[in-house]
Amino acid sequence: FSSVELTQHLLDRIQQLDANYNSFISVTGEQALSDARRADSQLGNGEGGPLTGIPIAHKDIFCTEGVRTSCGSRMLDNFVPPYNATVVSQLAAAGTVSLGKTNMDEFAMGSSNENSYYGAAKNPWNTSLVPGGSSGGSAAAVAAGLVPAATGTDTGGSIRQPAAFCGITGLKPTYGRVSRLGIVAYASSLDQAGPMARTAEDCALLLNAMAGHDAGDSTSTVREVPDYSADLERPLEGLRIGLPKEYFGDGLDAATGQCIQAALRELESLGASLVEVALPNSALTIPTYYIIAPAEASTNLSRYDGVRYGHRCADPVDLHDLYTRTREEGFGDEVKRRILVGTYALSAGYYDAYYKKAQQARRLIRDDFLACFEDVDIIAGPTTPGPAFGIGEKSNDPVAMYLEDVYTLAVNLAGLPGMSLPAGFVNDRPVGLQLIGRHFDEARLLNVGHRFQ
Ligand code: GLN
């Protein structure tokens, strides 16, 4: 079948089914069909590559030229960027057809998608459950078969956690592997974009198009991009997998732990060896992240002032009124909470006690991982402490919500690549196995992840 047929089929499915999932914020059907026609004519001429004509969707955090980019916020509800994020351009250049923009927690702050100005996205396995967040719309759309693959971003787990909750595969690359240009900034030293799809093989195809140096992002790395599809079949004999004892202790749901152990035994039967390792500073992870991420967010979000773009309050009486009412109206509760925490942590007098301490703890957390990687090739454990929870179950308890991130945050603090794979089910809810690799060793994660399709 042609790309136009496939695109039309998925647009019809979105129209019929997405009222149940709320996974899309914007659907760009006409643009998609015209891109699909172009892809079909390329394919007809024997041109194009493996992604030519393949429909995808972008998390609504990626700037898309001429298409509203809300970031899940009232603040950007009217924002139509004049340019594409580098990732969007790269995937378009590879021939993909974007069907639209997916739902997300406001400014990527959240673990359940309940913080979206456009309403919660739902988990397709059971619509009374959250799909995870913040890239919950992308995960739900892939899980519901509305699109074969989507982009996400991950600052502290936002690709891996929704991938786990929705039973799909999601990869957060090494910090610097993928350009951040044109991605609405949350915490700039942690943010990274990556692919979400059914399988590691599909993620490899997407990462081939997404990775690479971008002169427009000074933190993107000048480093050759390997062919991530090339090593998928490499045998696992001799692979050493480290299991951090801190990731299998109290706090991990027992049935989820058994599911993870069963997946690990599969890898062992394929020739890998399982080795216990230690990440002794794991207990510092949540407090460290929840200082650094809000601190960076509070400065990044200072640009939303009602002057340049985005929401502006009606009839301001003076400049101060413009700033305060615009921000009061434009930001939701969780975003305001992060701005308050971040501003406090950065204020003179508290800087040494909080931000500087958090930076020191960040280094200890990173060094723990580097020490493990002297002995093992990858680290494995659960992506989340348990399977998806109910909509509304944790939305009034920020600390309970932050605890959901206990196994994902350290990967961002250390800048490492991490991946979540569908490992089975507990009470009909998907469970994610997390793999963590050495810096720039995405190929290894994909190689192991390929065993899960
Ligand atoms: N749940 C984490 C937070 O709210 C991570 C979000 C993310 O990775 N964007 O900050």
Image (cartoon, grey):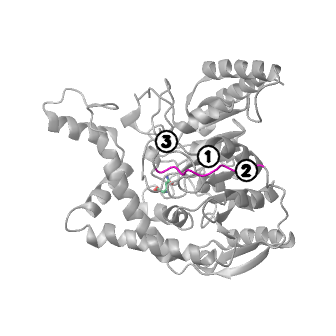
Q: Which residue is mark 3?
A: 215
Write down the residue under mark 2: 228
Q: Nearer the viewer, residue 168 or 185?
A: 185
Expressed as whole percent of the image width and height from the top left, the position of residue 442 reads 67, 57
Q: Of the residues under marks 1 and 2, which one precedes in the sequence?
A: 1
Q: Foreground residue, 371 or 241?
A: 371
Q: Is residue 25 visible?
A: yes
Q: Classify mark 2: helix, strand or loop.
A: loop
Q: Which image quadrant for residue 264?
A: bottom right
Q: N-terminal of the two: label 3 or label 2?
A: 3
Picture mark count:
3
Other-residue count near label 1 (Cα within 10 Å), few / some / many at <14 / 14–19 / ≥20: many
| Residue lying at 59% horizontally and 24% vertically, measured from the top left | 28
Which portion, as a residue range, is magenta? 219-229
Q: Which residue is mark 1?
A: 211
Is residue 416 found inside the magenta-colored segment of the image?
Answer: no
Relative to residue 285, is residue 372 drawn left or right?
right
